[in-house]
Amino acid sequence: MALTEAQTVLAHTMTEKQLLAHVRDAARTFGWRVHHCRPGLNRKGQWSTPIQGDPGFCDLVLLRGEIGLAVELKREGKEPTPAQEGWLQAFRVAGFETHVILPRDWLSGAVERILR
């Protein structure tokens, strides 16, 4: 579905944090279990997501019944890093559906179709 001019403007101004809130809330509405690692402020005053493992892990992991989704969220014009692509590929091999979701996907209704 093509976006209207207003939706296109909105897509380009939507932050990844806003997109995350929309997708996370919709996933819960449609009965998915949701996992997201939230960044925190460290002692140096920098925002980071503390991990023990390989970098690039997906923004959201969703489970419902026997279906698993691995989701990477990106702002318009951005693409997954090689590390993020590596995780998406690993999830595909493990049998998960994988999606890179942009604001335009939210605004067009594509995300709702994925989550239903």
Image (cartoon, rainbow, N blue to C red):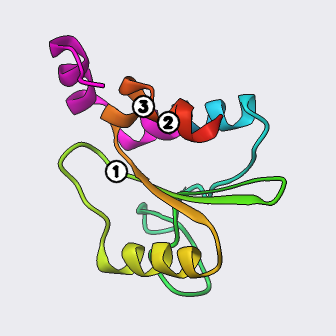
In this figure, which residue is indicated by the disc labeled 1?
74
Please state the horizontal and vertical placement of residue 12, each as a whole percent of the image: 20, 32
Q: Amino acid at mark 2?
A: Val
Residue 11 lies in what quarter of the image? top left
Instruction: Tell me which numbered mark, 2 or 1, is placed earlier along the sequence.
Output: 1
Indicate yes or no whether the magenta region holds residue 94: no
The residue tagged with tag 3: helix, strand or loop? Answer: helix
Q: Quadrant of residue 115?
A: top right
**Residue at the spot x=73%, y=32% of the render?**
30
Q: Report the residue marked by disc 2.
A: 111
Q: CA distance from mark 1 to mark 3?
A: 11 Å
Side of 57 relative to 2 (left or right):
right
Rendered location of residue 47, percent (x, y): 44, 60
Image: 91 above or below 24? below
Question: Which quadrant is the C terminus positioned in?
Answer: top right
Residue shown at the point (44%, 40%) measured from the top left: 17
Mark 2 touches mark 3? (CB < 8 Å): yes
| Residue 10 falls inside the magenta stretch | yes
The residue where tag 3 is placed is 106
Q: Quadrant of residue 15?
A: top left
